[in-house]
Image (tube, helix red, strand yellow):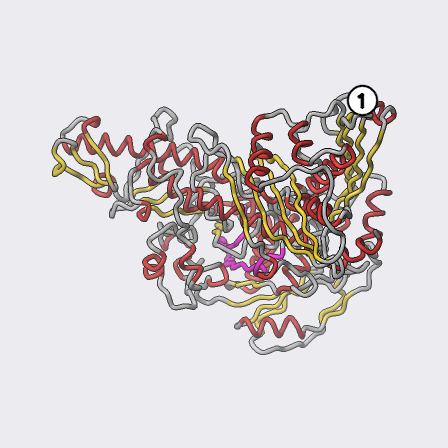
Amino acid sequence: MAHTDDIDVDAGLSRRRFLGTAGALVVSWALPLPLPAAAEAASFPLTIAPDMLDSWLAVLPDGSVIASVGKIEAGMGIGTSFAQIIAEELDVPLARVQVRMGDTATTVDQRGTGSSNGIITAGPILRRAGAQARHTLLAMAAQRLGAPADQLVVADGVVSVAADPQRRVGYGELIGGKRFDLQLSDKVEAKPPARYTLVGKPVQRFDIPAKVVGAYPYLVDQRVPGMLHGRVVRPPEAGARLLAVAPGQKFPGLVKIVAEGDFVGVVCRREEQAIAAARELKLTWSRPQPMFSASYDALYETLRTSTPKSSKRGTDVGDVDAALAGAAGVVEARYDYPFQSHACMGPACALADVTADGATVWMGGQKPYGLRKALAGLLGQPAEKVRVVWVAGPGSYGMNDADDAAIDAALLSRAVGRPVRLQYSRADGTGWDPKGPPVTTRMRGALDGAGQVLAYDLEARGYSGRIRPSGTDAPGDALSVQLIGGAKAKSSDLFQYSDENYRFPNKRKTSHLVAWEQSLPTGLRTAHLRDPDGMSMCFASECFIDELAHRAGRDPVEFRLAHLAEGRDRAVVAAVARKAGWVARPAPAGKRAGVVRGRGIAYAPRAGTMVALVAEVEVNMDSGKMRVTRFVVAHDCGFVVNPMSLAGTIEANLIQAMSRAMYEQVEFTPSRVTSVDWATYPVAEMADMPDAIDIEIVNNHVDAKSLGAGEPSTRPVAAAIGNALFDATGVRIRRVPFTSAALRAAFRAA
């Protein structure tokens, strides 16, 4: 098997030069301690012991430090934050810390990355490891220098005697290249936050300079000796079966045509040869019965009228039916949310080197450890013979096409006995990635004669977002194994509710899931997409809260504050209104022709993080063209390790979610997905960017627990824009996306 050190960056930049160019940094894509050559035929560790200090931290002979975490860098700069934590506890220069991520042979299994849990789960452990390593190194230095530990000081990784600074020794001299051989302890006191000089400070992400100049080595840049190139050919229609591969086909550079069940791939010597062979390959497919709805109107009607396969109630409060029956007024509305693609910047890539002795697979997904288990099962090899190495790809944020690409690469490598680099096309990536699920939601609310809310009733009907599981733990979870046949994904129910903390006397939430397992294996199978079901359910709930406020004749901010009791909920709503310069009014104001402007608010808790968002929009009532001109967000995720990275994370959430709200909807016919490129699946462009994004960080105190930020600010975006559209136009838009055509039709109908 090949080593990761065989990377060849097209720009001709060596790893050493790259580190210098980027400012000697956190290289989350690197493997600073490569396995010895003998490991090519040997077993990898089955597990990295989570209770050992050496599993999390190593000091090299030159005094630099390697931190290891079972997470990946999904593009939000978390590697820089991890480095800040380690550098802070050890008192070493930030530039001397590297972070190793997502390698099953060298990092602890932390179940990968998901649910915005990187800082939550890895941050405290790194802090403990850094504190214990510092304590141990001080004890070693005390013995070496002949001075009590409490008379020693540390600066830039060098320990010296406070009264005699010339007596000094560096970390590298004390332990460089050796193991601590200590169990991780929670008894060692970490640095008091009052002494922080790095954590909590805005530090520029170390990966940005190289990305700006095109020198950052992504997974697509990975090369190993003897590598071949692969492409896959998907069925032309959902459910089509492969009947025949025309015999005797020859293409330039062709090594092998691989056909198993309904899985088809080609392997060639060069990438352009693989592209041509996949395009020209002659195959005969069956003509299946249509599997999908004919339109979104038909889809939503199917969801509303089908008998659910499973239903679940949230925690009920009071008696909703009695409140509705006795109310002075009842408000009812339906909200629809479509299939959406991950639409990553680039389609997935993977590299696999499968031999009789084991396998190494380089991938760009979020959960390398589960994928190792699936690969071991697929290849019939013990897990300790399989190594999965994460390398930065085009992003993920859920279950995109990265894991499927890794499985495909392994299938092709096994078939030819050589390393194979598998690159998807744009049509593969957009047309065949797992999709965020659609949902249609009926909202009902009851008001008394004074406009007070008596009841809130949410009833969602949709497809589970775990038809394609959120990790790849078994071979059948992957698309190509399903196409081969004999294995099926371990689908499960992911019920769809809104998260909110409103105090209504009667409240009920019900989720109905309609059977969708038949979508395996097609381009409309559903899976996690950034903040799974969060934006769709917040869209329904928070737009409906606005509808209740409007019916009650109350300002949307005042209405929310009147029904929120928890301090952190109220704090973000009040903070965003203040920062946005919100002027209270109970109803839309202004003209209803030409270009109109409005503002809308939405609030959303997520796993302890609190977010409130104001969107300001301008809309052309004649053309339907809409633009968000400003976002204002109040964000409470507790203590922030790196405020600069948090600001970038929030901005990225808002822009991606804005794109999903304004443009993104997977199109399909009854037999196939037709969204296969940027023309058929448009996303926001530079001209759509807001003029301003203003961020208010709330509750950023050292004694506050650090919470997740990778997804929460996605959640309220569609609702805030929808409420702003109503404020601007007086027309309530209850279906995403807010395309020009949809808005124009709604305005004309109104």
Residue visible at 73% across and 46% down?
726
**Tally of marks:** 1
Is 125 rendered above or below residue 525?
above
Q: Position of residue 640 (x, y in %)?
A: 45, 37
* Residue 345 within the magenta-colored segment of the rendering: yes
Of residue 177 and residue 113, the one placed in the foreground of this image is 113
Q: Dot 1, how many residues are within 10 Å of its Cα: few (below 14), some (14-19), or many (20+)?
A: some
Q: Is residue 583 visible?
A: yes
Q: Residue furthest top?
A: 318
The image shows residue 602 at horizontal and vertical percentages of 65, 39
The residue that appears at 80% across and 38% down in the rendered structure is 442
| Residue 126 belongs to the span the image colors magenta | no
The N terminus, quarter of image? bottom left
**Magenta span of residues:** 343-366
Report x, y in % for residue 552.
Answer: 77, 32
Most foreground residue, 618 or 305: 618
In this figure, which residue is indicated by the disc labeled 1?
A: 319
- In which image quadrant can residue 744 be found? bottom right
Q: Quadrant of residue 308?
A: top right
Looking at the rendered structure, the secondary structure element under dot 1 is: loop
The residue located at (41%, 65%) in the rendering is 8
Is 535 situated left or right of 457 in this image? left
| 108 relative position to 604: left or right | left
Please tell me whether residue 632 is drawn above or below residue 559 in the rendered image. below
Judged from this view, the residue extending furthest toward the front is: 590
Pick the residue in front: 401 or 212.
212
